[in-house]
Image (spheres, rainbow, N blue to C red):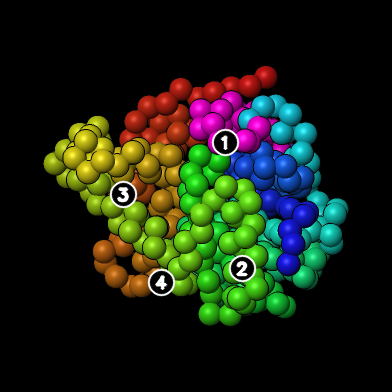
Amino acid sequence: MSINNIAVVGAGTMGAQVALLMAMYGYDVILKDINDHALSIAKRKLEQEVRASRMFRRQGVKADDSVLERITCSTGYAGFDNIDLVIENIPENWEQKKALHIEMARYGNKEAIYAVNTSCIPIMRIASLHSQPEKIVGWHFMNPAYGKDIVEVIKSPVTSAETLETSVSFLRSVGNRSVIVQDAPGFVSNRLSHLLMNEAAFLVEEGISTPKDIDIIFKKGYGHAMGPLETADLIGIDTVVNSLKILYDSYGDQKFRCCPLLTSMVEAGKLGRKSGSGFFEYKLQHSS
């Protein structure tokens, strides 16, 4: 199956990055979100992401404002009947995802591949909402999507060989290596990384160390590019909390019990980079 027409649903940080990645490699993309306000924010985010993407200098890839012309913002489903690939990026909330996929199954191309960029929700759970569940697959992009050249591809029990082959081929066309894993809550990357971020938060809560020193240990001692708490701020503390809840509910294991500090940070609006404050402080970028 060839991929020509692409829609990215959910224009938050990851959605904007994924749409930009596709456009950088010459694909035309529909970027859909729920209303004009969300898309207005997304357009400003895209301008910022174009500037940020220049630091990564992918070989033979454009990273200037002209790539934005390939991205069409929309609040509806116009053109979705001709879409070959839908990449879903909405927040890690099952009820929201369930409602969206039921809606997309009604309005979208039934022959399209639906790639779910989720952190912890099992792909089979989403596939059950579609009439052709074999066309549903997980694509877990890393942050930033245009800066990391690996995608965790999640195969549900019913994902077809053709869907997997098309996924690997397409992701290669946008400069990414695929690592295929079996379907399970959290998959590989998030089942491991959320344990690490959660335990790091407990260390801060218990006064054993500071966020800065915890991250120094992991960067200097283990060679990580980012520490666990910088990573939590990058992902969004609210996303980390939601993902830990899914992992806890899925496995019933106390090791996934969310650190109370993370919950209180969300309640206080300290969500990390996107709010300007998390475990560390950030300067928010504003565009006119």
Name which quarter of the figure residue 99 lies in.
Answer: bottom right
As measured in the structure, the alpha-carbon distance from the residue carrying label 3 to the one carrying label 2 is 33 Å
At 79% across and 64% down in the image, what residue appears? 108
As measured in the structure, the alpha-carbon distance from the residue carrying label 1 to the one carrying label 3 is 33 Å
The amino acid sitting under disc 1 is Gln
Residue range corresponding to the magenta coloring: 37-62
Quadrant placement of the C terminus = top right
SS at circle 1: loop
Q: Residue furthest top?
A: 288
Which label belongs to residue 250?
4
Considering only order in the chain, which callout, 3 or 1, is on the residue closer to the N terminus? 1
Which label belongs to residue 197?
3
Q: Is residue 103 left or right of residue 180?
A: right
The amino acid sitting under disc 4 is Ser
Q: Position of residue 247 (x, y in %)?
A: 39, 65
- Circles 1 and 3, Cβ within 8 Å, touching? The answer is no
Give the vertical position of 30 relative to 64 (above or below).
below
Considering only order in the chain, which callout, 4 or 2, is on the residue closer to the N terminus? 2
As measured in the structure, the alpha-carbon distance from the residue carrying label 2 to the one carrying label 4 is 29 Å
Q: Would you name the residue on which mark 2 appears?
A: 165
Residue 121: within the magenta?
no
Give the vertical position of 203 relative to 185 (above or below).
above
Considering only order in the chain, which callout, 4 or 3, is on the residue closer to the N terminus? 3
Residue 57: within the magenta?
yes
The amino acid sitting under disc 2 is Glu
- Circles 2 and 4, Cβ within 8 Å, touching? The answer is no
